[in-house]
Amino acid sequence: MRIGLLTEGGYPYVGGDAGLWCDRLVRGLARHEFDVYALSHGRQRRDADRIPLPPQVRQVRTAPPWTAEGGGVTPGRRARRRFAECYGELVEALGGGPGAASDPAAGTGSAHQADRFGNALYGLAGLARDEGGLSGALRSDAALRTLERACRGPRAPRTAREARVADLLTVAAHLDRALRPLSLDWYGDDGLGAADLCHATAGGTAALPGLLARHLCEVPLLVTEYGVQLRSHYLALGPDAAAPAVRALLAAFHGLLAGEVYRRATLLTPGNAHTRRWQERCGADRDRIRTVHPGIDAGRFAEAGESPDRADPYTLGWVGGVEPAKDLVSLLHAFAEVRRAEPAARLRIVGTPTGAEGEAYLGHCRALAAQLFPDEAEGAHAVGDNPVSFEEIGGPEVPSLPDAYAGAAVVVLSSVVEGFPNTLVEAMFSGRATVSTDVGAVVEVIGGTGLVVPPRNPRALAEACVALLRDPERRERLGAAARARALELFTVAQNITAFDSIYLEIVSHCPVRRVVLGAAGDPLPFAAPAETHVPVRWTGPTARERIREASGRAPVAPLHMISGAASEGAR
């Protein structure tokens, strides 16, 4: 089958976690064809910027950067009137309007508000298809005046009515960037219209092209979220980042867009239960949600997992990107209590800072470690040594990531905010016992193979670490159980197998109705298998068969099976 893979700011131009799992998915499903549609956030991408792609990738189409000029509605009276109507409906849905939700911060909106938003979105998509784009119209004075009227309306929330001109300009510019996929030429027979399935690798704006392909071409949409895009938008719109009116309007937009994606997608595959709860709250039907855990390469950690005796029995390890959300301050205070109970204990913090904020936080943690643990020496003539070490992967002590886990008897996760804890899964692959804070998907990942404590509780964290340091047999049992669980649930193979099965299921139940033409341009009446048009379930007994079995009567085979058997007998 042909898959339209939708990405945003990552694959096939950027590596990292987002690009890595997409690359593994494409390479693991070599029997399918992939067309990659990448939304770009920065400069114009070139073919030379791509990572090496396998032969099953037929084409890569990249949207221009969000700052690109050009494109727009033809300045005709009918087109301007049509744009004003659709855009007005959309921004009125953001500002409240009739039937607005009583809690706009929840992002879900009322049914009437969601319907208005969806109808306006598809109306703008149809206009963009007819007129060649909306970029010019979205940046026009008419769009700004329409937004202002919606914010000044009697039914608009108080925060929206207080919007200043600068706030309106900010919101209009954000809507222009977010709605830029409406103006792309991706929805024809040479693009997403020719796909059997659209697979969006994130929610929000990344899934918008798939939403339009579903509406315009009836192509089924699969949405995978390993991080909640809506939550990321909410965090980015903090009190220090934007004015109250801007936060209210943009939060409403992203909430309504997420709700529309979740309701219209054929199937949603969150990476964990935490993401699943967000999707259900935003209107997703739980019958169309199937959790698919991300896959991690287990082979890199095989040596560490098979040799737990390499670790120092008194060493605690922490691995990850250094930032305030990881709460290393609580970890350092907890380690101070660990040292009082176990003077021989050591703490190795292995990671690199994330951005300028991470650099400042790392400096603060180094200063706190020097204050809590002055350099100690074994004798009067020995050089002092600090029991806390800050290291980076690639150094002499930690040449590779598996070495970071192999050198620790217990791996600690001290975060206050966490999505899917990849470092925890890597520690499990390495066969290490773990102590984690109860955040994000930690409990779902750990199961019963590690100790879990409340976040921001150094005393509980210290007690759990001391309990494992003092009990090597328990550490070994937990480490072995953790490795077995990770090999069962979090490998690349299980991830690829799950998506292969999901692809086949979606296409078998939601086939795209299209006319297939031959070499001469004539329709081929039997090009599509007839069974793809039969609206029945292909697994399990039918309702009539269950009734007959319950009454003790012999089940009757379906008509297509009888006719097939008769034909086989005739041959």
Image: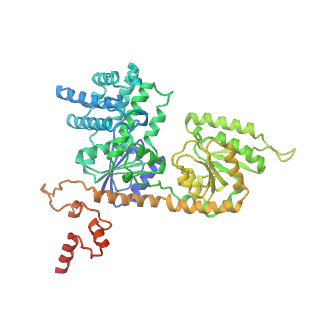
| Residue placed furthest toward the front | 551
Figure check: 433 above or below 246: below
Front residue of 46 and 1 = 1
Residue 294 on image: x %, y %: 47, 53
Q: Quadrant of residue 312?
A: bottom right
Q: How many marks?
A: 0
State which quadrant residue 13 falls in.
top left
User: Where 208 falls versus 87 (above or below)?
Assistant: below
Provide residue 467's location: percent of width, then percent of height.
Answer: 71, 54
Determine whether, in the image, residue 554 is placed left or right of residue 369.
Answer: left
The image shows residue 471, relative to residue 374, as above or below, that is below
Rendering quarter of residue 168: top left
Q: Is residue 39 visible?
A: no
Residue at the extreme right: 380
Image position, residue 538 (x, y; %): 29, 65
Image side of residue 271 versus residue 317, left or right: left
Q: Quadrant of the N terminus?
A: bottom left
